Image (cartoon, grey):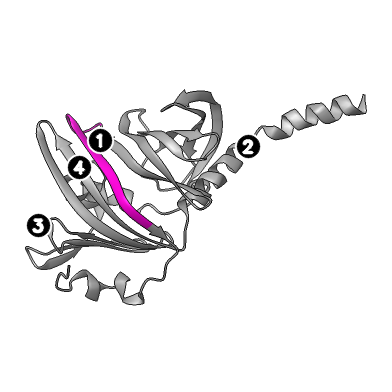
Amino acid sequence: SGMFIVGLLGVVSAEMTPEQIIKKLDFNNSFQTSYCEARMQIKVGRRKVTKAFRSWEAGNQKGLIEFTSRRDQGSRVLKLGEELWLFSASAESEIKLSGEMLKQGMMGSDYSYQDALDNAKLLDLYDVKILGKEPKEGHSCYVLELIAKKDVEVSYYRRKIWVDQKRFVALAEELYAPSGKLLKILIVEKVNQYGKRYYPVQMVIQDKLRKNSETRFIIDKIKFDLPIEADVFTRQKLTSRYER
């Protein structure tokens, strides 16, 4: 009967805890540094606009996004820990974003400035449970429910995440307010592999509070863990003249 017990234990241990799933998800999303060249295709009603940008990130504490499309050339967003600064090249002015401004869509997209600022690990903010398993975007997924821990500041009180069982990438996400109102939907359309890491390179975000609105993110090029000069994440860089 010893073998029978071992067999049972094998089955039990194969089931992952919600914490293990989130940790694997975090592994794919965490890196020392990254550099990417990407586009946001913003669709509001019949209006379509594409905004190209490049971004540099160090851990989840520092980031710089620089818009490269002709209309926005040299406009930048700088993240330093809990602070977010916006520089408009046309107005030649910088502002620190706070309060209601953080809820606005970045450059008119469905992705808010607050979304860009959120950098804490999910397990620090949420209690997690597995709701079950189901296919999403053609892959078997764990369905996770995350509810904000007591007395923690979060942008989204409840999140439902479909995590690919093999690659541990979030393939879809629904974000809710405390009232139960659906605020945003995120669908990952394409995932690439970089070494041991799987990373989404194309996704669509819909802000459900905006009518007929969606933003598609397309990463054309991304590199991880390469050296980045220290002055990239500075207010001097934020307001410097644009260089191609």
Q: Residues within 10 Å of mark 1 (few under 14, many from 20)?
A: many
Label 4: which secondary element: strand
Q: Which residue is mark 4?
A: 41
Residue positioned 54% across, 43% down in the render: 22
In the image, 61: left or right of 3?
left
Distance from Cα at disc 2 to Cα at disc 1? 30 Å
Up-down relation of residue 96 to residue 99 (above or below): below
Residue at horizontal 45%, vertical 64%? 225
The answer to whether 234 appears left or right of 190 in the picture is left
Report the residue marked by disc 2: 17
Q: Earlier in the sequence, mark 2 or mark 1?
A: 2
- The answer to whether mark 1 and mark 4 are in CB contact below 8 A is no
Q: Quadrant of the N terminus?
A: top right
Residue 136 x %, y %: 44, 26
Give how far across and how far down residue 168 sits, in percent.
Answer: 52, 40
Three-letter code, disc 4: Gln
> Where in the figure is residue 171, as x and y percent of width and height?
42, 35
Q: Residue 20: x and y, percent?
A: 60, 42
Mark whose residue sits in front, 3 or 2: 3
Left or right of 87? Residue 159 is right
| Residue position for label 3 | 70
The kind of secondary structure the magenta stretch mainly shows is strand
Amino acid beneath label 3: Arg
Residue in the image at 16% along x and 36% along y:
43
Question: Is residue 3 a member of the stretch shown in magenta?
Answer: no
